[in-house]
Amino acid sequence: MKILTFAASSSSKSINKTLATYAASLVKSADVEVLDINDYEMPLFSEDKEAILGQPKEAKAFYQKITQADALIISFAEHNGSYTAAYKNLFDWTSRINQKLFQNKPMVLLATSPGPGGAATVLNAAVTSAPYFNGDVKASLSIPSFYDNFDVAKNTFSSQELLTILTEAVSSLSK
C-alpha cells in the first residue's frame, strides 16, 4: 500500500506535518510519501488567472501524486477556523483539473493545534466536504493541546489513549 501524507499547512515547523508523518508511520506495511505543500505553490486561484495560465504544472503534479497513492492521510492546520490559505489555494487549483480530485481514495483526516480546540472546526469542514470531492473518509481525529499530548523530542505520543485511537484510525485504511 502506498500512502500519501501531508499537512495542509505551509509552516516549516508544522505540528500537523509531524502528526501526519507520525500517523503514516503507524501503517507498518506501507510505502509512505510525505509531501510538503510548499512544493506546489501557485498564484492565488481566480478564473481570470486560470484563463491566462491554464492548469499549472504544480496542480497537475499534486493531482498525479494523489492518483499514484492507494490512501491519503492529511492533517489540517486551522487558521481563523478554516483551511490555511496555502492548502485552500492548492485545493482550488487541483479541483479544476478534476472536481473528484480525491479519486475515491480511502482517507484519514487529522487536525491538531497547540490549544484545546485541536483544530476541530477545520477538521469538521474537511470531513463534511471530502465526499463531494470523492474522498472516502475512513476515520478522522482531532488532537487537542498537541504539545501536552505528543513528545516532540521522542517523536511519540505521551497520551497512550490518543495513540491507541490514532492507531485504530490509520488501520482503517487497509480494511
Image (cartoon, grey):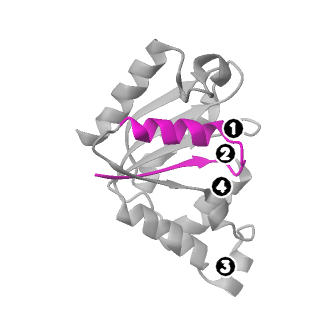
**Residue stretch in magenta:** 1-26
Q: Amino acid at mark 1?
A: Glu
Q: Residue at x 63, y 25 (%)?
A: 118
Residue 82, above or below 105 = above
Name the spot of residue 54 as percent of width and height, x first.
62, 83
First in sequence, mark 4 or 2: give its number: 2
First in sequence, mark 2 or 1: give its number: 1
Q: Amino acid at mark 2?
A: Tyr
Name the spot of residue 135 as percent of width and height, x first.
40, 50
The residue indicated by pointer 1 is 78
Q: Does residue 65 appear to the left or right of 6 in the view shown? A: left
Tell me how far mark 4 sits from mark 2, CA to CA. 6 Å
Q: Residues within 10 Å of mark 2 (few under 14, many from 20)?
A: many
Q: Is there CB contact under 8 Å for labels 2 and 3?
A: no
Tell me how far mark 3 sits from mark 1, CA to CA. 27 Å
Q: Is residue 106 or residue 166 the one in the foreground?
A: 166
First in sequence, mark 1 or 4: give its number: 1
Residue 78 shown in magenta: no
Q: Is there CB contact under 8 Å for labels 1 and 4?
A: no
The residue indicated by pointer 2 is 83
Q: Does residue 141 appear to the left or right of 53 in the view shown? A: left
Choose mark 3 or mark 1, whichever is in front: 1
Q: Amino acid at mark 3?
A: Glu
Q: Is residue 56 or residue 149 the one in the foreground?
A: 149
The residue indicated by pointer 4 is 88
Q: Residues within 10 Å of mark 3 (few under 14, many from 20)?
A: some
Q: Is there CB contact under 8 Å for labels 4 and 2?
A: yes
The residue indicated by pointer 3 is 50
Tell me how far mark 2 sits from mark 1, CA to CA. 6 Å
Name the spot of residue 100 as percent of width and height, x first.
43, 61
Residue 108 placement: quadrant = top left
Q: Is there CB contact under 8 Å for labels 2 and 1?
A: yes
